[in-house]
Amino acid sequence: SAHQFSKSLKLAERGRALLTSSGTG
């Protein structure tokens, strides 16, 4: 379960980074 949480967190972070980069660029 903890592994799943970490994976989800990483995915969310990546998605957020993509959104920010896309919004700024």
Image: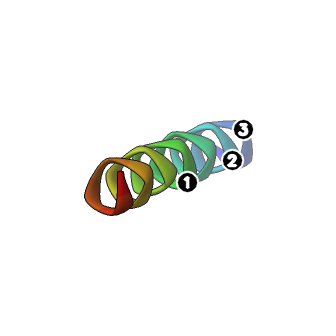
Q: Is residue 2 left or right of residue 14?
A: right
Q: Amino acid at mark 2?
A: Ser
The residue positioned 60% from the left and 50% from the top of the image is 5
Q: Amino acid at mark 1?
A: Glu
Residue shown at the point (50%, 52%) measured from the top left: 17
The local secondary structure at tag 1 comes to: helix
Q: Amino acid at mark 3?
A: His
**SS assignment at label 3:** helix
| Rendered residue at 40%/61% (across/down) | 20
**Nearer to me, 11 or 20:** 20
Circles 3 and 1: CB distance less than 8 Å? no
Residue visible at 58% across and 53% down in the picture: 9
Q: Is residue 10 or residue 3 the one in the foreground?
A: 10
User: Residue 13, how many percent across, how many down?
Assistant: 55, 54
Pointers 3 and 2 in contact (CB under 8 A)? yes
Query: Which of the labelled discs sits on residue 24, or is there none?
Result: none
Classed neighbour count for the residue bearing mark 3: other residues with Cα under 10 Å, few (<14), some (14–19), many (≥20): few
Q: Look at the numbered disc 2 and give the secondary structure of its residue.
A: helix
Residue position marked by numbered label 3 in the rendering: 3
Residue named by callout 1: 13
Instruction: Report which quarter residue 16 is drawn in.
Output: bottom left
Distance between mark 1 and mark 2 Cα atoms: 10 Å
Front: mark 3 or 1: 1
Whole-Å distance between the Cαs marked 3 and 1?
15 Å
x and y percent of residue 3 in the render?
A: 72, 38
Give the class, few, some or many, for how many residues have Cα within 10 Å of label 2's Cα (few <14, many ≥20): few
Pick whichever of labels 3 and 1 is earlier in the sequence: 3
Are dots 1 and 2 in contact, CB under 8 Å? no
**Mark 1 surroundings within 10 Å by alpha-carbon count, few (fewer than 14), some (14 through 19), many (20 or more):** few
Distance in Å between CA atoms under marks 3 and 2: 5 Å
Q: Which residue is tagged 2? A: 6
In the image, taking residue 14 as reference, residue 1 lies left or right, namely right
